[in-house]
């Protein structure tokens, strides 16, 4: 007691220690995020500078090449490669020939510095109040997202200047002192990219009229200066090409993510297309700017800037990929009153801005109109549709919390229970799930295809597996394969089962669980995803030729027919599948996952029997058709078992569905009821 009185209360000491630990963790997290940002930056610069000289910075050649802006004797627009404004050409023309040798490196590292500056300004512009943790972690996160985004990667690779107008607008809105300086910066940005003039109405209607006037005046002065110095080029750009329309690539190219480009891709042309584009453009501008003004008055100026930029993306006649950075800024908007809904919009934006459209949507003709216009759709959603929350909304800072199952003592106590691994009882967002499943499957397909390992290694491993099975008396594949071939209906049945049920059954189970048992859906989905990730490691480290591709062993490929083993051909699937991704067998692994889920959750005995039957038929099919060794099935069972084990380790036992009691429906303050029987619906 005396020692405690002299040294202070134990609670004070504990509190100080806890605060110091939290601060140390925060600093460690911050250092880790900055390290990730630095690695991404180095990776991007290395990718650019490691590309052969003739293939990188191709757009920069329009400035410094033999016929570039720095040396051109005639018009800037003698060829349609140069798409900038006359003012942009006038600004860069004074660059001397002596700078050309280092300009490629200087341009790349200069662009990198602009990205870092952009990230710092965006982090500083987050709506107030911002917690200390958010303030410290925001900058490296934003810079990392910028490095990963398609516009920045495209800008670095091509040597474009599209980051400069975005940076000038952000400097004018968040860093400039005084309205006149703010307007001058934004006006210079508009002189480089005319659609930036849309920020003048935003400034005017939010009370910064002096800045709006300065924006217009600076734009006019810069344009007139360029007109006086380059009259022919100015006439070509502003009159002949209608503010640059028609310069660069074809307007219906997939890289043009504007309303004009989308209408052309839909097959419209001529006066009808122009009239429809003008009507839609005016409608988007009116709706989007009204929303931007509302968010600016609400205190969310960064969101207002992002929405205005998305309007500029949509209404510009040509918006190339490197000019789409405004869309990424829209990630700062908050949408959704539930905690679980908060991730839908930012995840959708980040995925659209960092992944190619073919990774987001399946390669189906019905999806082509969406795939070809993904970034435009996101820009239109941000500017006109997504109901971003107001700062005054109670849900902005206190969304409806996610309902978790109570912790179970059966879980290993030394494994931390992270919030995103805790057993959630509520149904996840369908859009977010579909996005993540699609991206996960696209990544899975890409890694599986990339992990070829070579035919020689695959056949060597095939002989190893065959020898091991002989030692274990498991080499039954050849006998079963030839026995099945002797019975045509059995051969057809197993071939059909092999081709048809691999995807249908797991997707059906996931759909039923999502609709009827959301807590069990999360448990089953996590186990399947973790098991599949482990399988990818196997594909990468141990390429394996299946029995049907082993020369000299006499297996019959009942699914694809007789093959030239030196160069097998499976039709259109030859280029998009890795035939040596056999160990572990996900055909059997996924079927085993289906069986376990059905046996655990199905309410009737005959359903459980079907759950047991499916993996038995699958293992028979993969062996009978010559597509897998028996040990491949053992590997598939191992990774799926590990998937269930990791799910248990990270989140605990499977959460039973919880039924809401009448008292809770009447009074939300009532604490969560205890878990009920497994079969209860939530």
Image (spheres, rainbow, N blue to C red):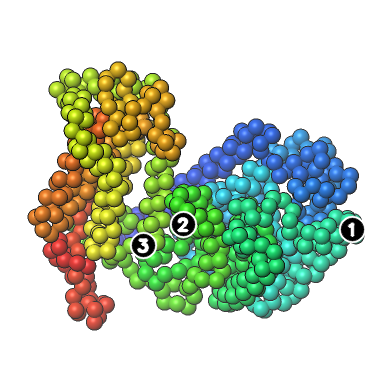
Marks 3 and 2, how far apart at CA: 20 Å
Mark 3 near mark 2, Cβ–Cβ under 8 Å? no
Q: What is the secondary structure assignment of the residue under circle 3?
A: helix
Residue lying at 27% horizontally and 21% vertically, measured from the top left: 554
In the rendered image, residue 425, in percent from the top left (x then y), is placed at 25, 63
Sequence-first disc among 3 and 1: 1
Residue lying at 49% horizontally and 75% vertically, measured from the top left: 390
Instruction: Name the image quarter holding the C terminus.
Output: bottom left
Residue 430's disc is 3
Most extreme residue toward the bottom is 666
Residue 366's disc is 2
Q: 456 above or below 107?
A: above
Sequence-first disc among 3 and 2: 2
Residue lying at 83% horizontally and 44% vertically, measured from the top left: 70
In the rendered image, residue 518, in percent from the top left (x then y), is placed at 26, 62
Marks 3 and 1, how far apart at CA: 56 Å
Sequence-first disc among 1 and 2: 1
Instruction: Name the image quarter holding the N terminus.
Output: bottom left
């Amino acid at each position: 007691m005396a020692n405690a009185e002299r040294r202070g209360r134990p609670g004070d000491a504990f509190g100080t220690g806890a605060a110091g630990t939290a601060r140390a963790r925060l600093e460690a997290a911050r250092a880790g995020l900055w390290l990730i940002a630095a690695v991404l930056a180095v990776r991007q610069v290395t990718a650019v500078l490691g590309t052969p000289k003739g293939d990188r910075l191709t757009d920069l050649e329009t400035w410094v090449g033999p016929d570039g802006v720095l040396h051109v004797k005639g018009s800037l627009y003698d060829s349609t490669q140069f798409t900038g404004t006359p003012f942009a050409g006038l600004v860069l023309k004074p660059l001397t020939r002596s700078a050309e040798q280092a300009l490629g490196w200087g341009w790349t590292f200069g662009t990198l510095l602009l990205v870092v500056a952009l990230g710092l300004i965006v982090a500083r512009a987050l709506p107030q109040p911002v917690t200390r943790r958010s303030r410290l972690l925001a900058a490296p996160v934003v810079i990392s997202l910028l490095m990963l985004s398609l516009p920045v990667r495209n800008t670095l690779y091509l040597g474009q200047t599209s980051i400069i107008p975005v940076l000038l607008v952000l400097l004018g809105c968040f860093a400039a002192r005084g309205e006149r300086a703010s307007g001058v910066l934004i006006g210079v940005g508009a002189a480089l990219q005319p659609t930036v003039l849309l920020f003048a109405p935003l400034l005017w209607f939010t009370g910064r009229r002096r800045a709006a006037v300065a924006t217009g005046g600076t734009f006019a002065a810069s344009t007139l200066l360029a007109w006086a110095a380059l009259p022919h080029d100015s006439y070509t750009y502003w009159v002949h090409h209608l503010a640059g329309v028609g310069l660069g690539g074809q307007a219906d190219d997939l890289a043009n993510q504007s309303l004009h480009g989308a209408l052309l891709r839909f097959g419209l042309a001529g006066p009808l297309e122009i009239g429809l584009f003008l009507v839609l453009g005016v409608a988007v501008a009116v709706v989007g700017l009204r929303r931007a003004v509302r968010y600016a008055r609400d205190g969310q100026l960064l969101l207002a800037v992002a929405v205005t930029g998305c309007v500029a993306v949509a209404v510009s006649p040509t918006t190339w990929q490197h000019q789409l950075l405004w869309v990424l800024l829209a990630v700062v908007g908050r949408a959704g009153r539930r905690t679980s809904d908060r991730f839908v919009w930012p995840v959708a934006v980040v995925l659209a801005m960092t992944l190619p459209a073919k990774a987001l949507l399946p390669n189906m003709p019905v999806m082509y109109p969406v795939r070809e216009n993904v970034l435009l759709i996101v820009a239109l959603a941000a500017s006109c549709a997504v109901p971003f929350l107001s700062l005054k909304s109670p849900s902005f800072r206190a969304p409806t919390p996610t309902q978790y199952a109570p912790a179970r003592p059966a879980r290993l106590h030394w494994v931390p229970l992270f919030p995103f691994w805790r057993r959630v009882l509520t149904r996840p967002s369908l859009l977010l799930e579909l996005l993540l499943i699609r991206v996960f499957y696209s990544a899975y397909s890409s890694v599986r295809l990339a992990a070829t390992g070579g035919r020689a290694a695959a056949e060597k491993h095939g002989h190893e597996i065959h020898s091991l099975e002989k030692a274990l008396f498991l080499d039954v594949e050849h006998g079963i394969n030839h026995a099945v071939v002797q019975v045509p209906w059995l051969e057809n049945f197993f071939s059909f089962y092999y081709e048809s049920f691999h995807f249908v059954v797991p997707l059906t189970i996931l759909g039923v669980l999502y609709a009827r048992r959301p807590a069990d859906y999360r448990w089953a989905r996590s186990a399947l995803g973790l098991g599949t990730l482990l399988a990818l490691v196997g594909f990468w480290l141990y390429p394996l030729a299946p029995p049907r591709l082993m020369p000299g062993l006499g297996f019959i490929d009942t699914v694809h027919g007789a093959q030239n083993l030196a160069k097998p051909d499976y039709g259109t699937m030859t280029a998009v599948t890795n035939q040596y991704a056999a160990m572990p067998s996900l055909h059997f692994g996924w079927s085993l996952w289906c069986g376990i889920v059905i046996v655990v959750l199905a309410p009737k005995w005959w359903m459980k029997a079907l759950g047991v039957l499916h993996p038995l038929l699958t293992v028979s099919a993969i062996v009978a058709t010559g597509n897998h060794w028996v040990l491949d099935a053992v590997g598939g069972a191992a990774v799926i078992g590990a998937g269930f084990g990791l799910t248990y380790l990270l989140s605990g036992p499977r959460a039973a569905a919880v039924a809401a009691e009448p008292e809770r429906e009447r009074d939300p303050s009532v604490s969560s009821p205890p878990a009920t029987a497994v079969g209860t619906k939530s």
